[in-house]
Amino acid sequence: MNVRSMKGLLLLPLLAAAALLGCRDKPAARPPPAPAAGAEIALFQIGQSEAAVQQALAAIPNFRPPDGAGSAALRAGEKVSTLEAQATRPAADRPAAMRFRFEERNLVQAELTYRAADAAARGALYDRMLDGLAGGATHATNQVLDWGGRVAWLHVSNRLLVVHEARADARDVTVRMSAPVFR
């Protein structure tokens, strides 16, 4: 057998293997990697489309049901619409509920609500989230309110983040993102 026929014999199995690999079903697109707990707001940006927001929901572990089905309900309007999502299962330091407001199908406001077991856990969650979000802020104001709640305004690259710990509710901490009022 000469060298040329040997090369031909070796090439044949390689071509067959390449053809078989090309015929396999492609795996489904995986959701983006899960963000750090308490940093889910980073998945959403002002101006993002409704479809992009719904796709980003899949990156949050407790919003991803085992069967892969969605967990969001859209309330459409003519120029303004809202999207609401509830967690499929409770998870520490992950949002329990999310609300999004769109104008002309573009995101103008996102609000994530986190739940803590009690007032002490709520205060620790507020502090941890504030520390995690304040790093990229150009300006931050942290204030204790008259009724005992705390709120922080963080100006972060063309958007405003408001972190709110309401003392009236023993569990809730919310993070709201919107476009800044003043530029």
Image: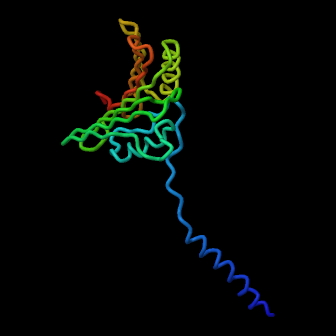
Q: Nearer the viewer, residue 157 or 147?
A: 147
- The answer to whether residue 123 is left or right of residue 80 is right
Task: Spot the residue most to the bottom.
Answer: 1
107 relative to 37 in the view: left or right: left
Residue under the point 42% across and 17% down? 165
- In this view, the residue farthest toward the front is 67
- In the foreground, 49 or 120: 120
Q: How is the image coloured?
A: rainbow
Find residue 7 and report its horizontal and vertical position in percent.
Answer: 73, 86
In the picture, measured across the screen, residue 130 lies left or right of residue 148, that is: right
Q: Residue at x 41, y 44 (%)?
A: 70
Asked which quadrant contains residue 145, the reply is top left
Residue 144 position in % (x across, y down)? 41, 10
Q: Residue at x 53, y 40 (%)?
A: 34
Q: Classify residue 17 as left or right of residue 68.
A: right
Q: Is residue 71 above or below residue 181?
A: below
Q: Nearer the viewer, residue 2 or 16?
A: 16
Residue 68 image position (x, y, % from top left): 47, 47
Placement of 68 over or under 169, stated as above or below: below
Q: How many marks?
A: 0
Name the spot of residue 61 as percent of width and height, x first. Answer: 51, 38
Residue at 44% across, 29% down: 96
Name of the residue lying farthest toward the right: 1
The N terminus lies in quadrant: bottom right
**Position of the C terminus by quadrant:** top left
